[in-house]
Amino acid sequence: MSKSSILLRNMPPIAQKLALRHDFSCFASARPCSVGILMSEEDASDQFGAESLSQETRRERFVRVAERRTRNVIERLRILGNCANRGVYEYGATDVDKIFRALERELEQVRHKFDDRIKRRSEFKLEP
């Protein structure tokens, strides 16, 4: 059994599809290849697995996408937290306040998008 067939068998199904469609050698390493830089299984399924996703319900799609995006936001916030290292960075209280005001403002805007009460528009009426 060849090394490539062993690697192919150990890959998730979506990666197997990609490996068979494109130059397989790039999938055995973490280097860029004919399909670009290697992607996670989730990203690959978003771009290339459309036929398998067509059976997905709206709820399943929401869960899949929202979980991934939430994990990405949390990871980026952790990375932002690295800026708190005073041994490497110099900042003041006003800088910190500006950062957190901007984050809180964006978070509130996103929350409003999910809030059904905000989506209901009041009907325009003139008093008699």
Image (cartoon, helix red, strand yellow):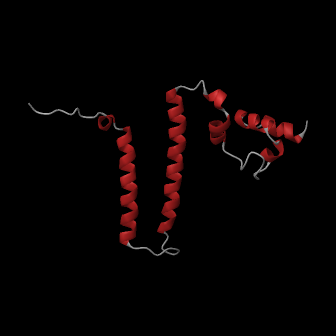
Instruction: Find residue 13 and report its horizontal and vertical position in percent.
Output: 72, 33
Q: Is residue 93 above or below residue 66?
A: below
Q: In which quadrant is the C terminus drawn?
A: top left
Q: Position of residue 7 (x, y in %)?
A: 81, 40
Q: Which quadrant of the figure contains the N terminus?
A: top right
Residue at 60% of width from left, 23% of height from top?
Answer: 55
Q: Is residue 72 left or right of residue 98?
A: right
Residue occupying the far top of the picture: 55
Q: Position of residue 44 (x, y in %)?
A: 66, 40
Q: Position of residue 64 (x, y in %)?
A: 55, 36
- Given residues 58 and 75, the one toward you in this image is 58
Left of 23 or right of it: where is 64?
left
| Residue appearing at x 66%, y 33% in the figure | 49
Answer with left or right where residue 56 lies relative to residue 11.
left
* Residue at 35% over, 42% down: 112
Q: How many callouts does the rendering have?
A: 0
Q: Toward which corner of the image does residue 97 lie, by quadrant?
A: bottom left
The furthest residue to the right: 1
As drawn, the residue found furthest toward the left would be 128
Q: Residue at x 46, y 76 (%)?
A: 90
* 43 up-or-down from 49: above or below: below
